[in-house]
Amino acid sequence: MQSYLEEDRHSADYNWLVQSKSPYLKKHETNPVNWLEWSNEAFEKARREGKLVFISIGDTTCHLCSVMAHELFEDEEVAKILNKKFVSIKVDREERPDINNIYIRACQINTDYIDCPLSVFLTSEKQPLYVGTYIPKLSRNGITGFIDVITKLYDKYTIG
């Protein structure tokens, strides 16, 4: 298996999840988002490129995971922003309950609503900056949309 550090393997046909064994992650292998699996290499890539990390945690039975995937992760506009400004990691919460539990606790601290999917933005050193659940693409009804969230986080925490 090639390393994330050796090659940017994203193409219009697949991303790094094409190598995954997880049925949930395989559902996202054709997303235009350049997804990586949770690994030290993914965080090293973020450090090397000076990028923040976006983690989407979900599972195959989660309805809002499917909604968010369709609204956001199949969307070329969202993918273009994520691919340029973040290292994006997809996590199957059934296969990695350890990771899910860490960020569920972070979500409990920051919000009263805890559910699937989890949307986590953090530094390359794994420090959470923003943790939430389902985020719509655009701001509406007092809910900040995904594009606004990623733009504000990028502007606030990126130097240069």
Image: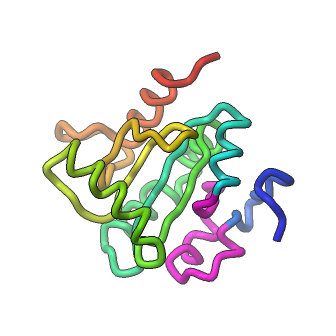
In the displayed structure, 10 sits above or below 58; it is above
Against 8, residue 61 (above or below) is below
Q: Main secondary structure of the magenta part?
A: loop
Front residue of 24/45: it is 45
| Residue 101 % position (x, y) | 34, 63
Q: Position of residue 63 (x, y in %)?
A: 31, 73
Q: State the image coordinates of residue 60 (x, y, percent, origin top left).
A: 41, 79
Q: Position of residue 119 (x, y in %)?
A: 38, 52
Comparing 109 with 59, the one in front is 109
Q: Is residue 50 above or below residue 105?
A: above
In the image, is 63 to the left or to the right of 160?
A: left
Report if residue 27 lies within the magenta region: yes
Does 73 sit left or right of 134 as displayed? right
Q: Is residue 104 magenta?
A: no
Q: Which residues are magenta?
A: 17-39
What's the colour scheme? Answer: rainbow
Q: Residue furthest top?
A: 160
Residue at the image position 56 percent from the left and 24 percent from the top: 158
Residue occupying image coordinates x 50% and y 47%: 54
Number of on-image labels: 0
Q: Is residue 143 left or right of residue 89?
A: left
Figure quadrant of the N terminus? bottom right
Which is more toward the observer, 17 or 81?
A: 17
Residue located 65% across and 54% down the image: 40
Quarter of the picture holding the C terminus: top right
The image quarter in which residue 64 lies: bottom left
Q: Quadrant of residue 148?
A: top left
Q: Nearer the viewer, residue 64 or 157?
A: 157
Is residue 64 found left or right of 74 in the rendered image?
A: left
